[in-house]
Image (cartoon, rainbow, N blue to C red):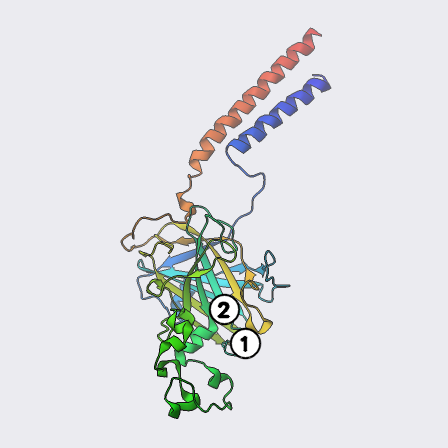
Amino acid sequence: MNRSIRSRLLAVCALLLVGALTVFKVPLASSQGLTLLAAYTAEQLPASAPDSPLWQTTTAIQIPLSAQQITAPQLASARIQSVTSRALHDGSQLALMLEWSDDTEDASSVGAQDFPDAAAVQFPLVEGPPFFCMGQAGGDVNIWHWKADRQADLAARQDMQTRFPNMHVDYYPFTDPGLGALAGAADYNDTNYLPALASGNLLASLTLGSPVEDLVAGGFGTLTSQPAQGQNVGGFGEWSGGRWRVIFVRDLASTEAQDVVFRAAQVYPAAFALWDGSNGERDGQKSTSQWISLQLEAGVTAPPAAAQPTSTTASREPYIFVLAPMAAVMALLVLGAAGLFVVASLQARRK
């Protein structure tokens, strides 16, 4: 077989192979993604107990983080470079625990120079993962956002008097003059003089029930808190020995249209973000992860909620249905190459 015929044969085989890979969307190179297994347990979930032995029955994974440098405000470099995560579910609720190193506990946002430590986890609300930073237009994400200052407020609400104990105020207008600096939001005679509270801003709520805020986003600049009645994510955070351990808890089912719905034995994309307050991190200045997979171990499940699109990779076509046609294509490639080889050999003999 001369060199010209051999070159044409190789070119035809290469084109056929590229065509097959394109049709069946097989990547030329791929890496193994991280999978976090939410182990099933029949015991009560340790929703506020990071030291519970139940967490040790799960497999922890370490998730790499990098500085958000895609849109302003950007983070120059990531101080928090990884987070360890574990997950549990009891058939009714899902619990996620994040653990990371942080030398300082930043749990106040009262002063203008104060920025709290924080953590967030997000899930797509559409089939297939959208952009991992806040989603995209047409690709909304459900975000659970824990903040250390909200955690501290549950124990004792912080105010200017907490941050500056030596401050002096004669009295606050529209409150009992005798209270002076001790007057709080609940002491106002008319909440219209507290515009954040009057407008329903969750940050001003006098009945804060969870340190976790339930939000939705569809791209940069679209982060929106869900209504107060839709705030259904619980949580707990504890700083000790230079490490934060933060737990998120929510029912697997939800009737909220902008909530992700979980079902056992399925896989869901998840992404994480962390903020280090002492590094001045807030808003888009954060450390983020790429998408990982969260898989709920099979077990007793809660009744399904109202139908809605769920972000699950398990609903994708099983590999067996891809391998079968791929095998057929490869067989055709082999047969085609053999046929070309025979034709080329006959031509060479005639010469």
* Mark 2 surroundings within 10 Å by alpha-carbon count, few (fewer than 14), some (14 through 19), many (20 or more): many
When the figure is inspected, residue 180 is found, relative to residue 232, above or below; the finding is: below
Residue that appears at 46% across and 34% down: 322
Residue lying farthest to the left in this orientation: 303
What residue sits right under mark 1 in the picture? 114
Instruction: Give the quadrant of the C terminus.
Output: top right
Report how far apart the C-alphas of labels 1 and 2 lie in the structure. 13 Å
**Can residue 95 be seen in the rendering of this structure?**
yes
* Mark 1 surroundings within 10 Å by alpha-carbon count, few (fewer than 14), some (14 through 19), many (20 or more): some
Instruction: Give the quadrant of the N terminus.
Output: top right
As drawn, the label of residue 118 is 2
As drawn, the label of residue 163 is none
Percent across and percent down for residue 160 are 48, 83
Percent across and percent down for residue 12 are 62, 23
Left or right: residue 165 versus residue 344 is left
Quadrant position of residue 103: bottom right
When the figure is inspected, residue 339 is found, relative to residue 186, above or below; the finding is: above
When the figure is inspected, residue 162 is found, relative to residue 260, above or below; the finding is: below
Residue that appears at 51% across and 27% down: 329
Residue that appears at 59% across and 71% down: 279
Left or right: residue 302 versus residue 148 is left
Residue lying farthest to the top in this orientation: 350
Comparing labels 1 and 2, the label whose residue is closer to the camera: 1
